[in-house]
Image (spheres, helix red, strand yellow):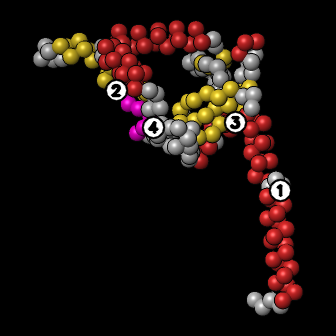
Amino acid sequence: MKLNRRQFFKICGAGMGGSSVTLMGFSPTPALAEVRTFKLARATETRNMCPYCSVGCGLLIYSTGDKSKNTKADIIHIEGDPDNPVNRGSLCPKGAGVLDMVKSPNRLKFPEVREAGSGEWKRVSWDEAFTRIAKHMKADRDANFVAQNKDGLTVNRWSSFGFLASSAAANEAGYLSHKVLRSLGVVGIDTQARI
């Protein structure tokens, strides 16, 4: 590229003018930071884990709503947690889309049941759902529990039931789930980490 003297001075003048304007405080960077701060200024920050896989990436969830007035919280922003030692603020594409999952109109928020022979799902209460699950588990355990094998050894097995645990749960929750299920005799226990 060939420049004559006049073009050289024009480029230098424009560069000096732009840097002078930036030094006088007209830089766009603080303005963008103020907009971001304003969006989250009155939001409540909550730390959580990404629900998708077993890596355990940390999330910062920002929600609006006043706890003292019992108003319903509304999640407005989700980002990676820079203090989390696993992901250090970065998220994979699935983790970056957690807000879309939370706000999805197709997200199931209440328990539903489909009766035998019916093609329709009906909404039930949480209490009814837990009671129904407990009754089905008890009936299956009573019908299929094996106390002793054919040699007379005590085995206490319930092999007709399986449990898929969350790999994003904390160690304590995983430990308690494992102990409760093993005390019931459950043999088939797995986590979503293998999916």
Residue mark closest to the camera, 4 vs 1: 1
Residue 111's x, y, as percent?
A: 61, 19
Residue mark closest to the camera, 3 vs 2: 3
Element type at mark 4:
loop
Residue 30's x, y, as percent?
A: 77, 48
Decide whether residue 172 is among the magenta residues: no
Picture quadrant where residue 152 is located: top left
Q: Which amino acid does the dot numbered 2 rest on? A: Gly
Residue mark closest to the camera, 1 vs 3: 1
The residue at the point 41 percent across, 32 percent down is 191
- Dot 4, how many residues are within 10 Å of its Cα: few (below 14), some (14-19), or many (20+)? some
Disc 1 target residue: 24
Element type at mark 2:
strand
**Separation of residues labelled 1 and 3 (CA atoms):** 33 Å
- Dot 1, how many residues are within 10 Å of its Cα: few (below 14), some (14-19), or many (20+)? few
The residue at the point 68 percent across, 26 percent down is 44
